[in-house]
């Protein structure tokens, strides 16, 4: 059974940092693209960033470039999202997704999804 488990969310003040983790199990980690998405109340889901062995790292959201960093530890089958200089508009539920077509490109549909972790940034 494939599982993606996000952790690391919380309540922080603007300007602070958080590191989210997405721990994968039940899949061959190297064969998947792993993406981070977020969804704020009343808004559509937004792609944030993605990492794969085939096309590297892609930041889909212009608003996070220079502030967020995606990385992976293949030995731990875990992808991280380091979020610095957080803003209130970063408030959302953050999800990770695994795509069996292992390229990030402009988007991944996600064959598997985690349950999400809440990030709240106060002003």
Image (cartoon, rainbow, N blue to C red):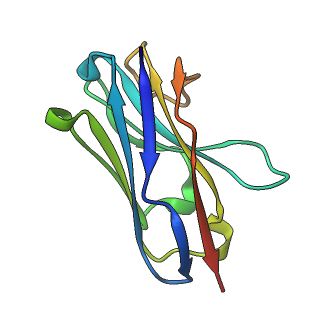
At 43% from the left edge and 52% from the top edge, which residue is drawn? 7
Q: Is 63 in front, or is 16?
A: 16
Residue 28 is left or right of residue 21, and the answer is left
Residue 20 is left or right of residue 92, and the answer is left
Image quarter of residue 40:
bottom right
- Residue 51 pos. (x, y %): 35, 36
Residue 108, above or below 89: above
Residue 24, above or below 57: above
Q: Is 44 in front, or is 26?
A: 26
- Residue 38 pos. (x, y %): 62, 48
- Residue 121 pos. (x, y %): 61, 75
Residue 76 is left or right of residue 70, and the answer is left
Q: Is 71 in front, or is 93?
A: 93
Residue 33, above or below 26: below
Image quarter of residue 77:
top left
Q: Quadrant of the N terminus?
A: top left
Q: Quadrant of the C terminus?
A: bottom right
Looking at the image, the residue that sits furthest to the right is 42
Decide if residue 21 is in sight here: yes
- Residue 4 pos. (x, y %): 44, 32
The image shows a total of numbered marks equal to: 0
Residue 21, above or below 92: above
Image quarter of residue 103:
top left
Decide if residue 83 is in sight here: no
At 35% from the left edge and 30% from the top edge, which residue is drawn? 24
Looking at the image, the residue that sits furthest to the front is 1
């Amino acid at each position: 059974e494939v599982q993606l488990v996000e952790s690391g969310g919380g309540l922080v003040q603007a300007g602070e940092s958080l590191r989210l983790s997405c721990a994968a199990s039940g899949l061959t980690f190297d064969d998947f693209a792993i993406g981070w998405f977020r969804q704020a109340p009343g808004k559509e889901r937004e792609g944030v960033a993605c990492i794969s062995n085939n096309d590297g790292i892609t930041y889909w959201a212009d608003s996070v470039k220079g502030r967020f960093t995606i990385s992976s530890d293949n030995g731990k089958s875990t992808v991280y999202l380091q979020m610095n200089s957080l803003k209130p508009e970063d408030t959302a539920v953050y999800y990770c997704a695994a795509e069996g077509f292992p390229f990030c490109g402009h988007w991944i549909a996600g064959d598997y999804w985690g349950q999400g972790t809440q990030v709240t940034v106060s002003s």
